């Protein structure tokens, strides 16, 4: 899913990295609630702030100017709002365009038995430290949600890195942090059947 929908940043109270809720805040452990559709003015602002942050964080010049930490995605809970909204943006590996997912009330409808994990492990805007270890997730995921850009219900089937990033953000909506999924006794232990991405 790709979209170039622009946001009017002149009217937007743009967030910075300091606005991101960090891991020691108990709100990150709350389970997010569904939001009413169409979005209220407040929820629309939250969505636009998330989109603006991630897009800007992936732009080298803007990221440096605004002192943003780069991110693939963000969830509303990370801004202190326990609401089922998230945004993910991944550059196309062919070097043009990007996959963008601005999702409202997303639900996972299926997960593959095949597993995958990122070779370098996962990171998170809400975590200021490096945490080593494999986070094993389903290699593919199917999600239904309201797509903010098209304003309709969509079904998304994602694989590999896209699947993992979407599952990471879905975890936030359930109060789960990525390091909860790391083997505490042996963080680098991994089943040979798991695909390393």
Image: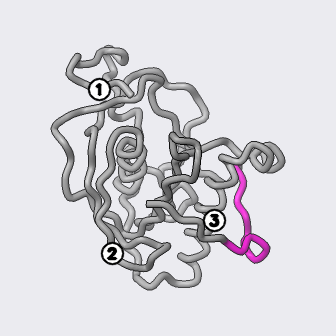
Element assignment for label 1? strand
Q: In the picture provided, is 156 more to the left or to the right than 63?
A: left
Determine crowd level at label 2: few under 14, some 14-19, many 20+ residues with C-alpha closer than 10 A.
some
Residue beneath the point at 32% across and 60% down: 156
| 175 or 39, nearer to the observer | 39
Vertical side of 185 occupied by 49: above or below: below
Q: Which residue does the numbered mark 1 point to in the structure image?
A: 195
Vertical side of 141 occupied by 144: above or below: below
Quadrant showing the C terminus: top left
Cα–Cα span, label 2 and label 3: 22 Å
Determine crowd level at label 3: few under 14, some 14-19, many 20+ residues with C-alpha closer than 10 A.
many
Q: Position of residue 192 (x, y in %)?
A: 23, 16
In the current view of this chain or complex, which residue is farthest to the left? 113
Determine crowd level at label 1: few under 14, some 14-19, many 20+ residues with C-alpha closer than 10 A.
some
Which callout, 1 or 3, points at the residue further toward the start of the chain? 3
Element assignment for label 2? strand
How is this picture coloured? one colour
What stretch of residues is rendered in magenta? 7-17
Q: Which residue does the numbered mark 3 point to in the structure image?
A: 49
Residue beneath the point at 56% across and 77% down: 44
Say whether residue 16 is magenta.
yes
Q: Nearer the viewer, mark 1 or mark 3?
A: 1
Magenta-highlighted stretch: main secondary structure? loop
Q: Which residue does the numbered mark 2 point to in the structure image?
A: 153
Vertical side of 70 occupied by 21: above or below: below
Say which mark, if any, is on residue 154. Answer: none
Which callout, 2 or 3, points at the residue further toward the start of the chain? 3
Element assignment for label 3? helix
Cα–Cα span, label 2 and label 1: 31 Å
Vertical side of 194 occupied by 148: above or below: below
Q: Position of residue 61 (x, y in %)?
A: 80, 46
């Amino acid at each position: 899913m790709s979209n170039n929908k622009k946001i009017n940043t002149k009217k937007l109270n743009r967030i910075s990295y300091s606005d991101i809720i960090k891991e020691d805040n108990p709100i990150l452990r709350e389970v997010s609630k569904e939001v009413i559709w169409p979005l209220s003015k407040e929820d629309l602002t939250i969505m636009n702030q998330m989109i603006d942050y991630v897009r800007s964080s992936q732009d080298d010049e803007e990221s440096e100017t605004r002192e943003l930490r780069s991110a693939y995605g963000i969830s509303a809970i990370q801004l202190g709002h326990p609401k089922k909204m998230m945004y993910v943006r991944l550059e196309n590996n062919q070097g043009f365009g990007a996959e963008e997912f601005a999702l409202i009330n997303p639900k996972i409808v299926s997960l593959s038995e095949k597993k995958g994990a990122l070779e370098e492990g996962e990171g998170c805007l809400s975590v200021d430290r490096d945490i080593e270890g494999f986070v094993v997730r389903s290699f593919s995921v199917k999600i239904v949600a309201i797509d903010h850009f098209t304003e309709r219900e969509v079904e998304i089937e994602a694989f590999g890195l896209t699947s993992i990033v979407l599952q990471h953000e879905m975890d936030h909506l359930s109060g789960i942090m990525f390091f909860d999924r790391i083997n505490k006794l042996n963080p680098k232990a991994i089943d040979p059947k798991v695909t390393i991405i």
